[in-house]
Structure formats: C-alpha cells, structure tokens
Image (spheres, rainbow, N blue to C red):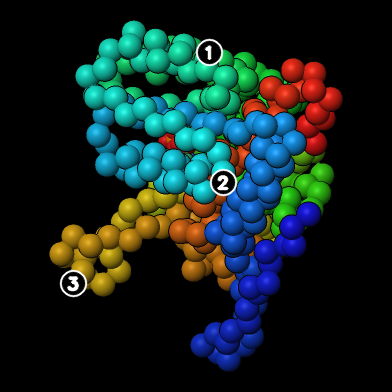
Amino acid sequence: MAPPCNGLEEATGNSEGDIVREAILIDGKAFAERIRQDIRDDVAALRRDYALTPGLAVILVGEDPASSIYVRNKGEQTRAAGMQSFAHHLPAETSQNDLLHLINQLNDDNRVHGILVQLPLPGHVDTQAVLAAILPEKDVDGFHVINAGQLAVGQPALTPCTPLGCLMLLHDHLGSLRGKRALVIGRSTIVGRPMAQLLLTADCTVTIAHRYSTDLPSLCSEADIVVAAVGIPELVKGAWLKPSAVVIDVGINRVPARDPELAAQGKTRIVGDVAFEEARQIAGAITPVPGGVGPMTIACLLHNTVKAAKATLSRRNTGFRAA
Ligand code: NAP
C-alpha cells in the first residue's frame, strides 16, 4: 500500500494574526507516479512469468488539438509502462462503418487488451454505436453498457478512469469510506454517475446533484466528501463546505488570466469547479487544479489495461489469479 500523500498541511496567519489551518493538498501527480511504478512492476512480471505484454489501442478520428495531445500522452505513457501501444489516427471524414470495421479487427487481435476511442467523435458518427462495438472485456474506458451495468449492480467491472482515480485518491487519504456522506455534483456517464456508483459500493451515503438540484450550498454543508464534476469555474464556494470535508475537484475550466494585462492579450489559466483559495481555508483536504485528479486519469487507463490483460490469463486457465 502506498503511503498517504498528505504531508502538505500548512498553517498560515490571517490579517488578524490568527493561525489559519489550511487544507491538506491531495497530490494527484505524485500518487499517479506511484501507480505508474506499480504498473511497470506488474507489466514486467506479466512479461517474465507469462510472456504477456499488455497492449492498448487508441483510436483518434479527426484533428481536434486537445484530443491529439491526450492521445499522444496516452501512447507515451503506455510505452513508458512497458506495454504495447497501437495508435490509429483516422481522418475526420472516416465513415462509421470503417470505424466499426477497425474496432472489430482490434476485438479479434490478441495483442490488444484494451481499446479506447477518443471522444468526442465527429458529428456524423453515432458514439453509442461505436462504444457498443467494443468487446466489454477490452473496454478500458468503462463506457460500454455492460460495464456500466455491472458497476451499477456492484459487480466487478472495468470502471471509467476519472472516477476510478478519484476513488483511489479518497481511499489513499481516508482509508475506509464506510458511512461517509458523499455529494457528487454532476451526473455525466463519464464522471458523475460512475463516481456515485463507486462511492455507493464503498458504503458511502451518496447524494447526486445536477443542474435542477435545489440548494446546492445546503447539500454541500452536509457532505464529508464532495466530488465536483460540473464544468462551471469555481461554482462551489468555500463557505458551502463542512469544515474538514474532503474535496475532489474534477473540473478543468479555462478562464482569463488573473493579470488584466495578460487577460487582455488573451492569456488564460486553468481553474476547477471549486473556488480553491476559499475552499482550502475550510476543507480538511482538497485536490488542486491542475495537479489533482487530472494526472490520475491516464494512470487509471493503464491500470485498466493491465487488469484487462490479466483477465485473459484467468480465462486461459493458466492458474493465474487476479489480485
Ligand atoms: P458534463 O458531461 O458537461 O456534465 C456536467 C454535469 O454537471 C451535468 O450532469 C450537469 O447536470 C451538471 N451541472 C451543470 N450545471 C450544474 C449546476 N449549476 N449545479 C449542479 N450541477 C450542474 O461534464 P463532465 O464530462 O462530467 O465533466 C465535468 C468537468 O470535469 C468538466 O470541467 C471537465 O472538463 C472535467 N473533466 C476532467 C477530467 C479529468 O481527467 N480531470 C475528466 C473528465 C472531465 P445535468 O445532467 O442536469 O445537465
């Protein structure tokens, strides 16, 4: 078990000279590096003991700059973990049939244990049909309805990477989550819903908030754990939080630079869904943005790919037992 990443608690003085205890910063970057080290060790053991090299295929359709950067990072980190990386970069006008044909080929390819289709897809492609074509046991993004359904009924599943990363950070910081009151803000299929299912499976009492929820401040004030996955810059205010709450900020929002001159030049900065400076005065622990949840996502993708590769050994009846 990795040591907790909670060595960053700070005490500072406020304008009245009182000592203000600031929240512990949950360092996702350092934790993701520890996961990647474990994965490198796991991959080395699979290669040595079973001649098995986990393989991840990533499909990118089109030239979206942000997606291209994500896909390049995924390929680099896959190779750095000692795994095989298969990159399929297709033109934006690729037909749905051609995309489905490629997925079928990857489904049949024994070297490929995980398949990821980078979203969003171009408008002429039916995203649900594409995700449904991936074999559930190779669905390392955890978006296939079979995996979503298994997660919902509390059975083992390949789980979406971002909420899985949030859960790992929470366990690392709190240990058991049993009995905690958790508020998940956002109900997307990528983050909010699977996050709520994972917290429920971890024996939390879970509330899910969305755009029609009323009195978000009061919901926040009751929560021991707040996971914000909304996409609205600094929506969650410090004063809403229960003192000592653990706050996981999934949001990635680009806003104008703080310095008006830089902002006038079009410079930007990244903030989360939580008003960080306020929240760190109240919360017990909080993930920064950037450097909190973000680095965990690709680490969990690699984790899921190794899990999918190990499952093939169990199916081959090699005597291998997945941990
Ligand atoms: P999304 O699909 O747009 O979902 C946003 C959710 O927030 C929806 O469920 C929406 O409710 C809810 N919402 C909107 N306004 C609200 C309000 N005023 N009060 C409460 N809930 C409200 O976004 P997403 O894909 O889940 O992503 C959320 C954020 O996380 C974004 O900033 C995204 O960039 C970031 N993200 C980060 C990572 C990472 O690796 N760190 C990964 C994925 C996403 P309705 O369902 O009612 O519309």
Figure check: 249 above or below 321: below
Q: Which of marks 1 and 2 is nearer the N terminus?
A: 2
Circle 3 sits on which residue?
Answer: 261
Callout 1 secondary element:
helix
Does 42 sit left or right of 161 as displayed? right
Q: Earlier in the sequence, mark 2 or mark 3?
A: 2
Quick one: 24 or 309, which is closer to the camera? 309
Crowd around label 1: few <14 · some 14–19 · many ≥20 (10 Å): few
- Residue type at mark 1 is Asp
Circle 1 sits on which residue?
Answer: 108
Disc 3, ligand 1: is the CB inside 8 Å? Answer: no
- Residue type at mark 2 is Ala
Q: Which mark is residue 145?
A: none
Does 12 sit left or right of 307 as displayed? left
Circle 2 sits on which residue?
Answer: 81
Q: Which of marks 1 and 3 is nearer the N terminus?
A: 1
